[in-house]
Amino acid sequence: MSRSEETTVECPKCTSEQSFTHWQSVNVTLDPDLKEKILDRTLVTFTCENCGYVAEVYHPLLYHDMEQRLMVFLGDEAPDASTSEDVSGSLASSSEAEYTFRLVSSSNELIEKILIRDAGLDDRVVEVFKLLLLEQLDESSKEDDAELFFSGIVREGDAEAEMDFELMSDSGTTGLSVPFEDTFRKVEAEVCHGLPTAECQGGKWIRVDEEYALDFLESDDSDPDTDNLGD
């Protein structure tokens, strides 16, 4: 089930206080409308009624999709027992190995995990691909704080599907697209054999990010073909 509580938030700009709904857990199978509110960020966005200031409110949040067998926890560490009531109840009739458990530290990462699973992709492969793609980008086109996020797969008519990404930094967001079959699928075929099995990682909360991809590439014997990934 989805759980929320009303809290009081102080506006960082004008210091006025107002009520804010803090969602502790969101089950998008039982409450599908909440999924769209996560994707468009309205679920975690504060808008000051006094001065109009808009900002995201960071707080621990458990995302649960029963159909996709996906749980993502937005927080600094794995959820504790009180936060995990939804987890234990949902797993009572299914094996933990059937579920994917992920830890993220921002709403951008949470949204990305949702989009990756909806696209039927393995987020571990996507992270490796993102790392390789970043290495291919011209240094002048990215800032030190730039982060790359998967945003979807686009198919138009008979044209080859494009894999879309957003390169985000303090100065703004830039879109980036690469051929899906001719680039991502090739890298996927080369790296998948070296990934831990579901049985190995089943039931474990894992942070799959750039560090995860770096560790994998350093420990794996495969050498993915990275030529012209961004062409």
Image (tube, rainbow, N blue to C red):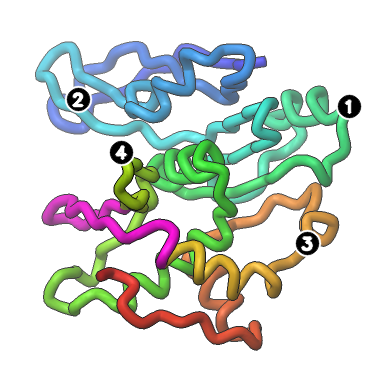
Check disc 3 and give the amino acid type.
Thr
Q: Secondary structure at mark 4?
A: loop
Let me know if residue 122 is in the magenta part: no
The stretch of residues the image draws in magenta is: 165-182
Q: Quadrant of residue 19?
A: top left
Disc on res. 92: 1
Residue occupied by mark 4:
157
State the CA–CA distance, disc 3 to disc 4. Answer: 36 Å
Residue 207 coordinates in the image, percent (x, y): 59, 57
Circle 1: is it few (<14), some (14-19), or many (20+) Cα within 10 Å? few
State the CA–CA distance, disc 2 to disc 3. Answer: 50 Å
Check disc 2 and give the amino acid type.
Thr
Let me know if residue 178 is in the magenta part: yes
Residue 36 coordinates in the image, percent (x, y): 41, 21
Dot 2 or dot 1: first in sequence order is: 2
Residue occupied by mark 3:
197
Position above or below: 210 against 99 = below
Dot 2 or dot 4: first in sequence order is: 2
Q: Is residue 60 left or right of residue 201?
A: left
Q: Pointer 2 and pointer 4: residues touching (CB < 8 Å)?
A: no
Q: Residue at x 19, y 25 (%)?
A: 15
